[in-house]
Amino acid sequence: MSTSLHTLQVEILRYNNVISLRNVATNIFILRQTASTIATDLLSRQNTSILANLSVFPGLLEQYNIRYTEKWVKRIDENFLEYYYGLKPALNIPHPSPSQSASFPYIYHKFFSGDVSGMIAESIFIYFLDHLGININLIGHLRPMKQRNAYQPDYVIWDGSNAIKTLIQNPQFQPPLYAEVKGSTGGIDPSKISKAFTQLNNVLISNTDSGLAFIVFKDSQRVSYTGAIIEVTI
């Protein structure tokens, strides 16, 4: 499958409710309940609006991958096509077959990689921001901090133009904008939304601060990826 002749569609949604972290992040039960509600809404397209129907050119996606994603995963253009369509190569199964030798459970197909899914999601996020006209030269990937309760979000965005403000409903917003990206090859795991909110809560300080959780997922009704923007404030 050529990576140079295909453009694939990715719908980008906005979750219409701005999430106040002051109201959810300090109570683990409310945090999990809120994340579960958002996941359900996104899958059913409730409380959402369409921001863009993004035509993704895989070769360009690889360029964003090279410059803007965290992990050393190459050829996102090729991986994107395979993950987009859910192509899982079959593995060799020796004889006797598993039915004849039940004590040896074989793997029939390759598994998708969480690292690759994450880098696809980050690349789609940058692709989307560039599509909006945001100056991607003003975007940096933050260094991951692994200390307990000290996780940072993925990105800081210094662009304060009208393009970035199309994503923000907070009337007091001032740059920078922080963003955390989560990706999946299946449905939405609410725990990933909870984790994104916790990471953003570590950097949002004042009423002028805003953050974005960008969730990339696939559901049983669609082959293609969907991206969703969730705005958070303190």
Image (cartoon, rainbow, N blue to C red):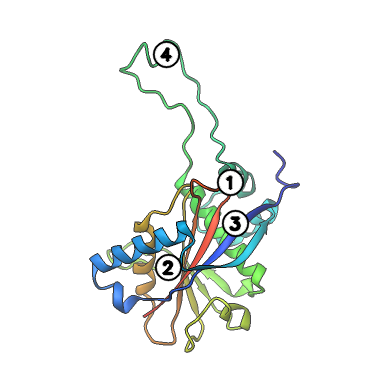
Secondary structure at badge 2 equals: loop
Label 1 is placed on what type of residue?
A: Tyr
- Specify few, some or many for label 1: CA neighbours under 10 Å numbering under 14, 14-19, or 20 or more: some
Percent position of residue 2, x then y: 72, 41
Lower sequence index among marks 1 and 3: 3
Question: Given the image, on which type of amino acid does mark 4 rest?
Answer: Ser
> Which residue type carries mark 3?
Asn
The extreme right residue here reads: 5
Looking at the picture, how far across and down is residue 100, in whole percent? 36, 11
Tell me the mark number nearer the camera, choosing from 4 and 2. Answer: 4
Q: Which mark is residue 153?
A: 2
Which mark is nearer the camera, 2 or 1?
1
C-alpha separation, residue under disc 2 versus residue under disc 3: 17 Å
Q: Earlier in the sequence, mark 2 or mark 3?
A: 3
- Secondary structure of the residue carrying tag 4 is loop
Q: Residue 145: where, in percent of width, then height?
A: 37, 64
In this view, the residue in front, 146 or 149, is 149
Q: CA distance from mark 1 to mark 3?
A: 16 Å
* Residue beneath disc 3: 65
Q: Label 1: which residue? A: 84
| Mark 4, other Cα within 10 Å: few <14 / some 14–19 / many ≥20 | few
Dot 2 or dot 1: first in sequence order is 1
Task: Pick the residue in front: 54 or 77.
Answer: 54
Distance between mark 4 and mark 3 Cα atoms: 41 Å
